Structures are given as structure tokens and as C-alpha cells.
């Protein structure tokens, strides 16, 4: 049997979804169509790295015609298909038809911690997680239809939550939650729409680094990595790749603390993704990497 090889040579693109490859409000990826086609034609692995759940990502992959590994819930786990060159990988455990490498705390542990923290009524009024919300609430907050909102509720490694209002009491409650989370082995990160409660040490960068290490054998040596994001929870991923690509958030602009020398898009969402990822890939072609 011939040795397995990574598609697309030794380049991998890791990408955030909401606000990056997907437009912030419409979730459309239409603006990225030219570079998505180029990636497919050149066989470059496109690895989704997102706060979304496995159920959500599987459906999005169907839309893209994508069958590469993916990372869910802000680095909670990396999933590797049992097909194509990835079928040779032995890392991780069997889960839902994939090989899975987990990095985070379980959803049950996260919900138990949050419930204990919110034992006071005033905290329950300020903090509202996905597990506290009805399907209709999530649909209204995200613009997702019932099927996709249901998939967003099927969480395994993280809890998105909202802080009610911009009052001093709300800010103090968030600070108290962050401090208690650190004491109990959890932490908070911020995405494009929600804060996220997850296990300490769980982040996109750690999951990306582990995925690169896992795939290096298929590439036959060094892998050049491109990473694309728009929010605070993408910063560890951008720090873990060779070529960080920044997409501006439509309201907040670029996150603070972004890596020096990053490729910056001039537009938000899928159009900015198309512009900046195309530029990054052109740079690799021109330098022979």
C-alpha cells in the first residue's frame, strides 16, 4: 500500500467561521467563493476551528463539500474523519464515526459549575447560558433556523452565555464569574456574539498545534499553516500558525493583541476572508513554500 499523503502538499488553512468565513449577520460564505474554489482545486486542507458544535460543523461541511478534520467549541476537541488520507491516523478515541482528540472539560461539568455560581437570583438574572435558553431564544439571538439552533444547543465542551445589560452590576458579576472560574479550573473567552465558559487551558491554539502535530506525518515533514480569525477567542490560534490572517469585526474592528505581521483584510466577513486568504496563499506561491 502506498504511504498516505496530506492533500495539497504541505499547506493547511485553519479558519474561524462566524465573522470570518461566514458573514456576521447572514452566515453566508458567498463572498469567499473564489478562494474556496481555489482551495478545493489545489487540494489544500481547510480545517474549521470554531465555537460551534460538532453537529453544526458537520452540516456546514456538507454545504462546502469539505471532508477535512475540524475543531469545535473553542478547542474543546479535534475530530478526524475515518476516510481519505486521514483514515490512517490512530490518534485519539473513536467518537461519532471520527477519531477525536479531546482537550476540554465536559459540558456536564461546565453546567454544574455555572449552576452553582448562579445560586443567587440576581446572578441568574444577569447570566444566561445556552443551557438556560429555549430554542426560540437562541433563534432570536443568532438568526439561526430551528434545525441549526437545535444543533447549537447540542454542546459537548463549552457554554456560550450572555451578560444582561452594560451596568456596573453586570460587569462586576462577569468579573466574579471569571475569578471563580479560574479557581475551579475553568475560564472565559469572548467570541463574536457570546462569552464562552470552558475548561482551563482549552483554546483554539492548543487544538491547532495538536492537529498540526497529528497531521505532520501525512505531510512528510514541515507544514506551513495559515490561520484566519476575527475575535479574541481566535488569538491563540493566530499565534499558533505560521501566517495569521485577521478579518475585521463589523462593529469592533480588529481584536487587540493580534500577532505582528498578520495579513489584514480590509472588509469583514466572507469578502474579507476571500481577499486576505487569497493574498496569503499568493505569498506562499511566490516564496515557494
Image: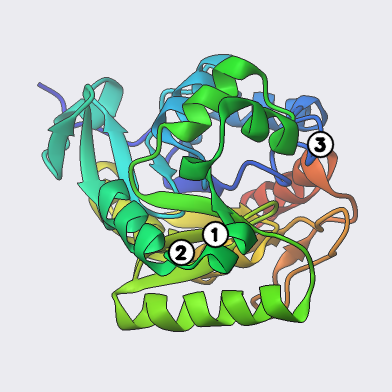
In the rendering, at what x and y percent does residue 3 appear? 17, 32
In this rendering, is residue 265 above or below 4? Answer: below
Name which residue lies at 61% across and 17% down: 146
Q: Which residue is mark 1?
A: 124
3 vs 2, front mark: 2
Residue 29 showing in the rendered view? yes
Q: Nearer the viewer, residue 155 or 123?
A: 123
Element under disc 3: loop
Asked whether disc 3 touches disc 1, contact meaning CB atoms under 8 Å apart, the reply is: no
Residue 92 lies in what quarter of the image? top left
Q: Which residue is mark 2?
A: 118
The disc placed on residue 25 is 3
Element under disc 1: helix
Name which residue lies at 26% across and 42% down: 218
In this rendering, is residue 138 above or below 18? Answer: above
The answer to whether residue 252 is left or right of residue 133 is right
Asked whether disc 2 touches disc 1, contact meaning CB atoms under 8 Å apart, the reply is: yes
Marked residue nearer the N-terminal end (3 or 2)? 3
Element under disc 2: loop
Q: Nearer the viewer, residue 204 or 211?
A: 204
Q: Nearer the viewer, residue 165 or 105?
A: 165
3 vs 1, front mark: 1
Q: CA distance from mark 2 to mark 1?
A: 5 Å
Amino acid at each position: 500500500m502506498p504511504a498516505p499523503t496530506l492533500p495539497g502538499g504541505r499547506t493547511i488553512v485553519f479558519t474561524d467561521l462566524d465573522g470570518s468565513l461566514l458573514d456576521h449577520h447572514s452566515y453566508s460564505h458567498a463572498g469567499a467563493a473564489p478562494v474556496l474554489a481555489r482551495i478545493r482545486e489545489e487540494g489544500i486542507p481547510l480545517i474549521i476551528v470554531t465555537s460551534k458544535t460538532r453537529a453544526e460543523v458537520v452540516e456546514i461541511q456538507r454545504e462546502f463539500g469539505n471532508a477535512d478534520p475540524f475543531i469545535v467549541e473553542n478547542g474543546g476537541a479535534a475530530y478526524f474523519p475515518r476516510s481519505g488520507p486521514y483514515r490512517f491516523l490512530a490518534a485519539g478515541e473513536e467518537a461519532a464515526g471520527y477519531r477525536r482528540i479531546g482537550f476540554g472539560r465536559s459540558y456536564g461539568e461546565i453546567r454544574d459549575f455555572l449552576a452553582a455560581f448562579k445560586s443567587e437570583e440576581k446572578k441568574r438574572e444577569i447570566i444566561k447560558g445556552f443551557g438556560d435558553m429555549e430554542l426560540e431564544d437562541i433563534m432570536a439571538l443568532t438568526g439561526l433556523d430551528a434545525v441549526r439552533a437545535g444543533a447549537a444547543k447540542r454542546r459537548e465542551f463549552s457554554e456560550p452565555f450572555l451578560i444582561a445589560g452594560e451596568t456596573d452590576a453586570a460587569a462586576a458579576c462577569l468579573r466574579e464569574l471569571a475569578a471563580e472560574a479560574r479557581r475551579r479550573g475553568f475560564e472565559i473567552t469572548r467570541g463574536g456574539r457570546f462569552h464562552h465558559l470552558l475548561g482551563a487551558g482549552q483554546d483554539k491554539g492548543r487544538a491547532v498545534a495538536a492537529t498540526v502535530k497529528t497531521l505532520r506525518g501525512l505531510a512528510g515533514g514541515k507544514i506551513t499553516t495559515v490561520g484566519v480569525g476575527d475575535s479574541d477567542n481566535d488569538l491563540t490560534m493566530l499565534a499558533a500558525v505560521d501566517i495569521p490572517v485577521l478579518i475585521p469585526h463589523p462593529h469592533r474592528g480588529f481584536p487587540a493583541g493580534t500577532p505582528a505581521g498578520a495579513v489584514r483584510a480590509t472588509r469583514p466577513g466572507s469578502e474579507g476572508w476571500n481577499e486576505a486568504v487569497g493574498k496569503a496563499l499568493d505569498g506562499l506561491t511566490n516564496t515557494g513554500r
